[in-house]
Image (cartoon, helix red, strand yellow):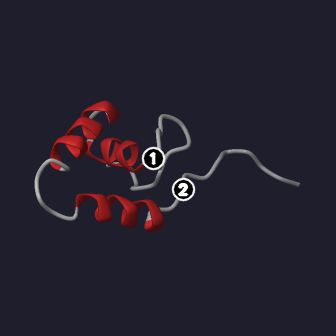
Amino acid sequence: MAALVRPQQGRMIGGVCAALARRFGTSANTMRVIFVLSCLLPGPQFLLYLGLWIFLPAEKTATTRW
């Protein structure tokens, strides 16, 4: 399984759905649909998204700096 980091490519707002999709081996669009549908149910989904956006590290780029 891939590490849980917010990718630089394929992200829309914060990269949380793209990170979860990469982690669980599904497409980012599928994860986004699941998230939007889950927002129709009562619960702290939006707060969880914000928390993951804040606490998940961003993916490092492969460039080297001198």
Q: Nearer the viewer, mark 2 or mark 1?
A: 1
Q: Is residue 48 above or below residue 41?
A: below
In the visual, does 63 lie left or right of 26?
right
x and y percentages locating residue 16 in the rendered image:
39, 50
Which residue is drawn at the image coordinates 67% and 45% (left, top)?
Answer: 62
Which picture quadrant has residue 66? bottom right
The reply to whether the C-beta atoms of the residues labelled 2 and 1 are less than 8 Å apart is yes
In the structure shown, which secondary structural element does the residue marked by tag 2 occupy?
loop
Give whichever of 20, 3 is nearer the camera: 20
Residue identifier under label 2? 58
Distance from Cα at disc 2 to Cα at disc 1: 9 Å
In the visual, does 18 lie left or right of 30?
right
Give whichever of 41, 1 is nearer the camera: 41
Residue identifier under label 1? 15
Give whichever of 27, 1 is nearer the camera: 27
In the visual, does 46 lie left or right of 12?
left
